[in-house]
Every structure is written in C-alpha cells, then in structure tokens.
Amino acid sequence: MNLIIDIGNSSCKSALYEKGELKEFHKGSNSEIEILDKWNRSFKLEKTIVSSVITIPRRMEEQLSSLPCPTTYFSNRTPLPINVLYRTPHTLGADRLAAIMGAQGEAPCKDLLVIDAGSAITYDFIDAEGNYHGGNIAPGIDMRLASLHEHTNKLPHVGKEGETPTLGYDTETAIRSGVINGIIYEIEGYITELKKKHPELLVFLTGGDQKSLIYKIKSCIFADEFLVLKGLNRILTHHDNI
C-alpha cells in the first residue's frame, strides 16, 4: 500500500493507493496528519511519498519518521520520466510537477494544460513528447478577494460563495463577479492562446477551488480533484523502478 501525502498552504491531503487504485482519502490540517495512526494500524504501508509547499511542521516530521516504511520526499531533484525545460528548476514547485505527472498518467502522449486552482492558480503545459515547458502563477480566488479589502479603504471582504452575475448589481456582487469571472476569462484566454499552436490540447483542472470554476468554463475541461495525488503515486512508482 502506497501512502501519498500532499502538504499545501492551507491543508494536507493524504491517500492510500494500491496498484494504482485510490483506496482511502483524507483532507485535514497541514500541521499534522490526523488519520496517519489509524492507517498505520489498519494497513500495511509499504512506501511513502511526501510533497510539501511549506516547511514541514515538527509534529508531522515526527509522524513521518515513525513510519515503518521508506519515505521519499519529492522535490524538483527527484528523477522524472519527463524533460523539464524550466530555466530555474530549483524554484519549481513540486506540486506543479506532481499535477503534470498526474495529468500525463491520465492522458499520455497528449498536449496538456494543467490548471491547479488553490491558494494560487498555476498554469502548466507539457507537450505530447513529454517536454514540460513551464507555466504561470496567479493569485487564487481567496487571495484576490482578500487583497481588494486589504489594499483599499472601503471595499468589504467578500466571500466566494454567492451570485456572480456578468455585471454586479451591488458592491458585493461586483467584487465577487470581478474576481471569479475574471479568473474564468483568464482561464479561457490561456486555453484559446495555447490551442492556436496545439489544437488537440487537453485541459485538466484541479485544486480546492476547481468546483467553484468548472461549471462556468465553456471550454472542455477534465476536472480531477485527485490529480496531484495521482501524480505523486505515479512518481513513487517510477522512483522504485530506477
């Protein structure tokens, strides 16, 4: 049983995979893995992979060091079966590479755009030959909503849940629509531009905010909340075979 751990800016996702199939999933705090003791007692953990965009908290480090199986800490130095063309690979987020690997596992030998809508929104492109060209990073929904409040004197802090008309009819809907609809137009713009050169482009959407966006996007997109976990499991399998 493979234990897969993805530590993000605001949460920790963990999963158990057996022969490529998801068996258990848990989302919780990024300060400790609440489910780990239970899984350790209930399943035979054979190997673990950890990806983190933050410094791993001490409590979590203690939990991981007590596991009865080898642990791989995924980074941009971990060998991958793709060609990374990013000019500064040492600054490339491991979660971005994991999402790319997850999408490529679902649609091999295809031109792929992977959009991860979390605290930040990342856009990453890999071509059908397995060349990762890079991508872009933009503020996520919550970050944009918060910044409008924090960097102005009078605009309120608006939540992302609620109406998003094409044109806001009050300040609350104007802010929410400006942020969320703006992100939709942003996503559609990237897809349109990349399809000029890669007409067979496939698009994957993942991340905590994918459910807030997927039904508003006109282009054909595959939504997969487990894309990063799938990618990490694939990386772990590749790591064992080299």
Image (spheres, helix red, strand yellow):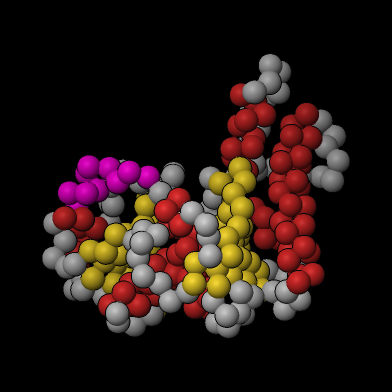
Question: Residue 6's quadrant in the figure?
Answer: bottom left
Identify the image quadrant of the C terminus: bottom left
In this rendering, the answer to whether 104 lies above or below 193 is below
The residue depicted at 71 percent of the width and 18 percent of the height is 154
Q: Is residue 154 left or right of residue 45?
A: right
In the rendered structure, does residue 56 fall within the stretch colored magenta? yes
The residue depicted at 30 percent of the width and 82 percent of the height is 241
Identify the image quadrant of the N terminus: bottom left
Q: How many marks?
A: 0
Q: In the image, which residues are magenta?
A: 54-63
Rendering coords of residue 131 (x, y %) = 55, 73
In this rendering, the answer to whether 33 lies above or below 193 is above
**Residue closest to the eye, 187 or 176:** 187
Q: Is residue 81 left or right of residue 164?
A: left
The residue depicted at 64 percent of the width and 23 percent of the height is 151
**Residue closest to the eye, 221 or 24:** 221
In the rendered structure, does residue 190 fall within the stretch colored magenta? no
Rendering coords of residue 179 (x, y %) = 71, 41
Principal secondary structure, stretch drawn in magenta: helix
Rendering coords of residue 238 (x, y %) = 35, 77
Residue 180 in sight? yes
* Residue found at the far top of this picture: 153
Q: Is residue 160 left or right of residue 168?
A: left
Rendering coords of residue 118 (x, y %) = 54, 50
* Residue found at the far front of this picture: 87
Question: Residue 190's quadrant in the figure?
Answer: bottom right
The residue depicted at 17 percent of the width and 49 percent of the height is 62
Question: Residue 130's quadrant in the figure?
Answer: bottom right
